[in-house]
Amino acid sequence: MPANPSEIKKREAAARAAIKKAYGTADGEDGPTLFVSHHLEELDAAFWKQHFSTERPDPQRILDGLVLRSHWGGDDEIDTFDFTLPDEATQYVISVAFDEDGVVAGIAMES
């Protein structure tokens, strides 16, 4: 059964907040921190300029610019939310998993 659109929006907002909160912390080391540092090194200045109006955006701006690639898992398809950079610039995602109570249970960088 598809999830309620308001629950999807609620969890997307919770996932985005958790990503930003985890950035630069030990909990975010293998998730948002690694994702941002990796892509700042790997993507050329033209990509950043096109999507962020600067050749080297600050990490928070990158996190603000993440796009929701998909949400999936379980019968209601809201157990995991995957975020990435615009225009399919990478195969990597920041994946945010929720527990059965709708609380963020983990954040990781995956491909």
Image: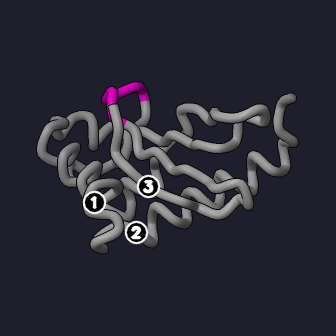
Amino acid on which disc 2 is placed: Ala
Q: Position of residue 50 (x, y in %)?
A: 33, 37
Q: Quadrant of residue 109?
A: top left
Determine whether the residue tagged by mark 1 lies in a helix, strand or loop. Answer: helix
Viewer-side residue, 14 vs 64? 14
Badge 2: how crowded within 10 Å, few (<14), some, or many (20+)? Answer: some
Cα separation, mark 1 vs mark 3, equals: 11 Å
Span of residues in magenta: 87-92
Q: Dot 3, crowdedness within 10 Å: few (<14), some or many (≥20)? A: many
Q: CA distance from mark 3 to mark 2?
A: 8 Å
Camera-nearest residue between 101 and 6: 101
Q: Residue at x 65, y 58 (%)?
A: 13
Q: Which residue is mark 2?
A: 22
- Residue 12: % across, % down: 65, 51
Badges 3 and 2: C-beta atoms under 8 Å apart?
A: yes
* Position of residue 82 in the picture relative to residue 30 (left or right): right
Q: Label 1, on which residue? A: 33
Residue at mark 3: 107
Gap between marks 1 and 2 measured at Cα: 8 Å
